[in-house]
Image (tube, coloured by chain):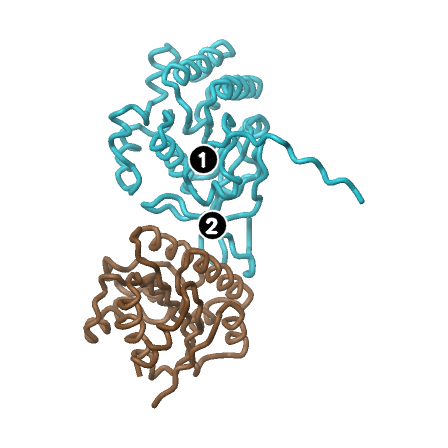
Chain colours: A brown, B cyan
Amino acid sequence: MASDIADRLMELPESSAVSLRMKTEHYFDVVRAILDVFAPKKELDAIYVTCTIPSASIINALEVLEIPVDNIWFVDCISQIMMSPAQKHEHAIYVESPTMLENIMLKVEYLIRHSASNRKDLIILDSINSLSIHNNMKILNEFLHILVNTLRSKNAYTLIFSMEEYETDEVRQSVNLVCDQTISVKGD
Amino acid sequence: MPTPAKEPSAERDRCRSGIEGLDNLLNGGIPRGNTVLVTGSVGTGKTSLSVEFLIHGARSGENSLFISVTESSEKLLANLIHYDFFEPRLLKEGRLIFMDLPLIYERLGLEKPEFDLQDTFILTKVIADLVREMKTKRLVIDSVTSVCYRLKTQENIRQFILDLGTALSGLGCTTILVSEISPGAERYSLFGVEEAIADGIITMSNLERRGDLLRTLQIVKMRGTTHSRAKYVLDLTPVGVLLVPLLKGGSIAAG
């Protein structure tokens, strides 16, 4: 499945903003497709904004999947709010809470500038459903609109995760408004 | 059909702060020669913004001078190494100079709690002479509030800011005067005089929204250019000050 998803991602033009709809069970197939196939093939630096699972857990999972994190950076918006003893990873920066949407934009901007490489950027927002738990739709719409258009102007790819089980019509409409296309991940 | 208002034909030369977001909000930078009040309460990023303005100036070949009133230069210099864009050669080459005002007071025999009008003239002249001799194009005084404490009367403060601004502008020097105010203050300077005389006011504050504290920046006034008047959220990072628009969709309790 991961290679099918990667094939579809490879067809995307530069600066695309894409909604990736999936069932929770397909989450790791999608992550593998993006971080193990799509990003390396396109030589992209990946900025993974996690609002669902702490970055430490994702990094552990990537190690198990033997996906190197050399070109992956994390904006972790959930570890601090969980009050868990922070194990800081050198590839992770932290936002105190998923309600600090401006700070998410600022950290993404910082990582784009910090890398200062010639490689293009890929920003993964995981997930819109988690963000909608912590924020009202008005501010979330505004956030998506500004974030996606800013990234587009920097020729970056934006992938927004949406978990089908937790998707509401409001969230779907909000994502559709800013994304160029939707890729629905289906099982075999 | 009504005739459209005439645009000024000659754009004023700009002093680019080097802070990309801020320069965009100012349509290219601070009009050269302006005296700008950067005002805010503690921890809002006034000194960081001012220092970055000087480093970028020094990097682009403009002599830049920081006159420190409250904090020792040594302490400030220790913080510079955290910036990715700082180069120690700027200090060695004299492009970027840090100076402690208390040392200047000492040399002038102005070690007294209150200045009269004559002392104010002397201080203005000394700063202007420094700028002239060093061919300074960017100056920061951090903070002007601490200087104003010694000037006591509103007349003295007015005279000091007015004379200083006129002298520095004449020398082509773009100046930032850092102004300290208490959180929630309804004016932009402690004595209420500085804000009326300055060419520009940039206010920095802490905005609380549903328990989250955000650092914000807003340009209230800037003579010689059109500019944004919206509020922006900022972050102080090793690559410098970064700005994004303040989202308005949520319930904003204050600010």
Q: Nearer the viewer, residue B100 or A153?
A: A153
Q: Which residue is mark 1?
A: B16
Residue A81 seen anywhere in this rendered image of the structure: no
Residue pushed farthest right?
A: B1
Q: Disc 2 on helix, strand or loop?
A: strand
Q: Which residue is mark 2?
A: B233
Q: Chain of mark 2?
A: B
Residue B121 lies, in percent from the top left, at 49, 12
Q: Is residue B159 left or right of residue A186?
A: right
Q: Is residue B253 left or right of residue A117?
A: right
Instruction: Give the mark, 1 or 2, whose residue is nearer the N terminus.
Output: 1
Mark count: 2
**B163 shown above or below B146:** above
Image quadrant of residue A2? bottom left
Q: Residues within 10 Å of mark 2 (few under 14, many from 20)?
A: many
Residue A100 lies, in percent from the top left, at 44, 59
Quarter of the image with the N terminus of chain A in it = bottom left
Q: Are marks 1 and 2 in contact (CB under 8 Å)?
A: no
Q: Disc 1 on helix, strand or loop?
A: loop
**B66 shown above or below B241:** above
Residue B175 seen anywhere in this rendered image of the structure: yes
The residue mark sitting in front, 1 or 2, is: 1
Q: Chain of mark 1?
A: B
Q: Residues within 10 Å of mark 1 (few under 14, many from 20)?
A: many
Q: Which mark is residue A69?
A: none
Image quadrant of residue A106? bottom left
Spatial CA span between label 1 and label 2: 20 Å
At horizontal 44% and vertical 26% (from top left) the residue drawn is B146
